[in-house]
Amino acid sequence: MNIQQQNGIGHKKSLKQNGHYVEPSWPSFKRSAWIVFTLAVLCFANSYDGDFVFDDSEAVTGNKDLKPETPLLSLFHHDFWGRKLDSKTSHKSYRPLTVLTFRWSYSLAGGLFPMNFHIINIILHGIVSVLMLATFSLLMGGCEVRDGRPVFGCPRAALFSGVLFAVHPVHTESVAAVVGRADLLCALFFILSFLGYVKACLKDVDDESLYRPSTASILWLIVSMLLCTLSVLCKEQGITVIGIISAYDILIICKIDLLESIGFKSQPETMKADEQEFIKPWKKCFLFRHVILLISGLIILTTRWRIMGSTTPTFQVFDNPHSFVNGSLFRALNYNYLYSINSWLLVNPWWLCFDWSMGCIPVIESLSDWRIMVVIVFWIILASLLFTSLTGILTQQKKTLVRFLNSRNITMALAFLIIPFLPATNLFFRVGFVIAERALYLPTAGFCIIVVTGVGKLCQDKEKREMIKYCIYYLVVMFVIRSVHRSDQWRQEMTLFLSGAKICPLNAKVHYNIAKLNGDKGNADIAIEKYRLAIELNEEYDQAMNNLGNILKEKGDLIEAEKLLLQAVGIRDDFAAAWMNLGIVQASLHKNNSAEKSYYTALKHRRRYPDCYYNLGNMYLEMGKNQLAIQAFRNATQQKPDHVNAWGNMVILLDNIGLTSEAEKVGKEALQYNSDPSLLFNLANVLGKQDKFKESEVVFLKAIQQSNKDSRMYANLGVLYHRWGKFEAAVKAYTTALQLDPSLDTTKDNLRMVNRKMEKAQRK
């Protein structure tokens, strides 16, 4: 039996006595797995009843790909947000498997009920944490083959690493936000792919050499690459598992000394022959496996590139201002500063924000900026870790093999820390964010290994061991508390946005979101205040200008609203929504020529824009251009067949200009797409005017059945009965209308009139 293992906290070997294996005293792998799973679930369990928040509104609640009526194959032609991949607005985030699980959640729950989505996320995080425990056990505790099966070791170091990963607060976004399922599923298949590759390289029987010296299991290699593909179909970050696999193959399976391989040092003469053999059994299988990795990676990347339309996504300056900095030097300084902030979030996860854009982290524009010192400190720490991993000086023990194994431990930790983070570095392509905590879900594994390895080093001092143990407990408890607190903040948008304002008070987008939420709730004054602050922080925040203009328009401040909307379209000429809103304001100011130009500019930039046609029709209606109004309403209903207001206005207009039969025809056409009570009401009135009393009564009763507290419907039904000669039914309808709304003077007059007619009829 051969056990490949590395130092950890309280590490002990499995022993073989009298032909039987004697397990170490610490918890078994199964028990450790339950500990890790339980902690992972408990830390984020209070998010189970949270709402759909932030990006969930676009990727889940607003994504038609979740609906059963949408063809299943549409998922594979759309991006993560439900847009066509060839659309200019698409971010090219192709994650069909993640969207497919959203669709399953929707079907199982029978609709958009957030609890069902959140519970699945929490369970997924627990499963991923257990798989991470297996990975930590493999890296830190070694692996052995027993009866043809690989058995991972589970020292206290692996358990501590697994616990740290399970409870780390930086995972909150990935677990508590429904869209974070992309990270969870990606990590799930990522780890399975890695473990599958390890399985491909293990021997099938007990032997002095753990891994295959000259070949590998083709079946397991294929399985590993298929799992990698599934990971990529959940999130783009999954492709980086090939880098992790390659690093593990080089450092652990083939045991290559990197410094020696590039000629920076020679092999120690004192190393024993068996230790030399331990380091160099890789040559026969190394190239074969890496050719498989290379071909698989190229196939995945090429396919992904073609699906994207062979183009990269387009982002605005406010999405990622650091990537738009002029000059390679300052761009590099900004990127490295962002890397240091990401590292700090792993160390200090009390400083978390749902969005890090728009002024949250100001751009470095001068060499005198003090933050350059942060970059220098970051690289000193990283260089120290790299030096440690290459030279194996972490331990003071004298055995060369132990130094060799410890250096591999740190190197693999750096691989897990850096390689999965590469897609978020802006080095290969511009990303659409400044910092995204979700991008740290996988790199956290490397951070955990580094922390535990450092603690293991400190534990070599017996006098400090007890104190360090309590420090570890304290760290875990604080992480648990922070995770529970942070996941509670993610339950509702308002608490999430307010927490962001405390962390990033200069972030215009945070204040924009607070303003939008208050605006939707009718808190206009707070919304106006926050929108103004967002514009003050970012003078080119066109979306905030558009929304503030809308609120001011509703409050009657048309002059300032027009000014803001003109600013918005001046900043972004193709901002269709702002052009339409500008048209509404200008029409209210009776600037009809300008309003008409604004409407048509909006339609130029967004051809399918039913609301714009509807508002254009309203303007033509006010101007008395009836035919143009009808055509505009018709365009709106053609683009959006269930557009209630456009159908209703068209029916009323046709009725008002005497085209009653045409109004009836349009009203019946509208009911084929939408049976809204207002459409039924309008059609009933048109039928009544044509003396089609019975048909009108049926339609009125349908409308009342759907909206039985609408006084207008009872009042008009009374008019129908009145004209029909059914005076008792008219009295009943009028009376009901007045009970619902006593201020209906016309209905009072009609009621008195019908009562007089009934009295005359009785006298006769």
Image (cartoon, grey):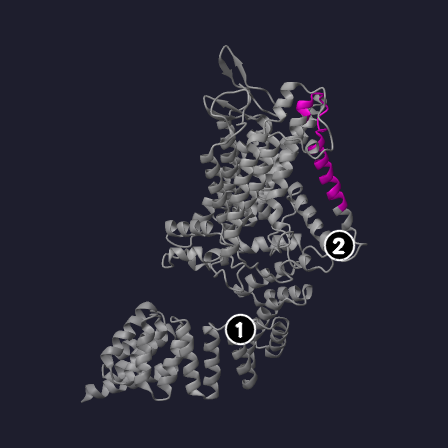
The reply to whether the magenta stretch includes residue 394 is yes
**Residue segment shown in magenta:** 376-403
Q: Nearer the viewer, residue 539 or 607?
A: 607
Mark 2 is surrounded, within 10 Å at the Cα level, by few (under 14), some (14 to 19) or many (20 or more) other residues, namely few
Quarter of the figure with residue 67: bottom left
Which residue is found at the position 59% from the left and 52% from the top?
354
Mark 1 is surrounded, within 10 Å at the Cα level, by few (under 14), some (14 to 19) or many (20 or more) other residues, namely some
Q: Which is more N-terminal, label 2 or label 1?
A: 2
Residue with the most extreme right position: 368
Q: Nearer the viewer, residue 23 or 496?
A: 23
Which residue is found at the position 41% from the left and 82% from the top?
631
State the quadrant of the C terminus: bottom left
Please tell me whether mark 2 sits on a helix, a strand or a loop: helix
Residue with the most extreme top position: 18
| Viewer-side label of 1, 2 | 2
Quarter of the figure with residue 654: bottom left
The reply to whether the magenta stretch includes residue 553 is no
Q: Give x and y (percent) for residue 324.
A: 68, 60
Please tell me whether mark 1 sits on a helix, a strand or a loop: helix
Q: Nearer the viewer, residue 580 or 217?
A: 217
Residue 713's place in the image compared with 759, above or below, is above
Q: Of the numbered discs in the image, which one, if any, rests on residue 42?
A: none
Tell me the residue that label 1 is attached to. Answer: 605
Q: Is residue 681 left or right of residue 197?
A: left
| Residue type at tag 2 | Leu
Tell me the residue that label 2 is attached to. Answer: 329
Q: Is residue 483 left or right of residue 386?
A: left
Q: Give x and y (percent) for residue 157.
A: 60, 28
